[in-house]
Image: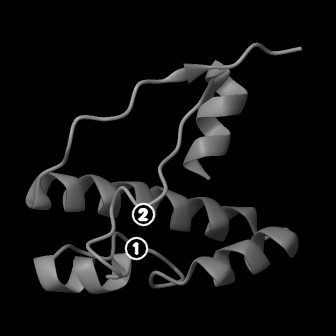
Amino acid sequence: FERGVFFHQLGKKIDFDGELQRGRESKAKARKRLGIPNYDDPFYDRGLWCMNAWYNREFDAAIAHNRACCLKERDILIKEGFRKPDELEFVKQE
């Protein structure tokens, strides 16, 4: 989701893969371990449910889930610490 927003709004390709993972820890486990709230995520960390909601045109629920995910990821980075991000790769729009 976040990559798509950056790419389509700014024309910037950014890779988030693995940035929030500790080994193989899921975001849900990290959130619970760190005491991070659910932020009214209607799908309780289940991204597949969000994708299904989007396909079923349940846009409000999908957007609420993605908002909650961004807040959870922010909190994980703040609580766990984070590394310097990779350089951005700028992509020309055609």
What SS does tag 1 mark? loop
Asked whether disc 2 touches disc 1, contact meaning CB atoms under 8 Å apart, the reply is yes
- Residue in view at x 89 percent, y 14 percent: 94
Amino acid marked by disc 2: Ala
Mark 2 → mark 1, Cα distance in angstroms: 7 Å
Q: Dot 2: few (<14), some (14–19), or many (≥20) neighbours within 10 Å?
A: many
| Above or below, comparing residue 20 to residue 25 in the picture | above
Residue nearest the observer in this picture, 91 or 66: 91
Residue 90 marker: none
What SS does tag 2 mark? helix
Residue 40 marker: 1
- Residue in view at x 86 percent, y 71 percent: 55
Residue 68 marker: 2
Amino acid marked by disc 1: Asp
Q: Is residue 50 left or right of residue 78?
A: right
Quarter where residue 44 is shown: bottom left
Q: Position of residue 82 (x, y in %)?
A: 18, 48
Q: Position of residue 28 (x, y in %)?
A: 35, 83
Residue nearest the observer in this picture, 39 or 23: 23
Q: Is residue 3 left or right of residue 73?
A: right
Q: Position of residue 92 (x, y in %)?
A: 75, 13
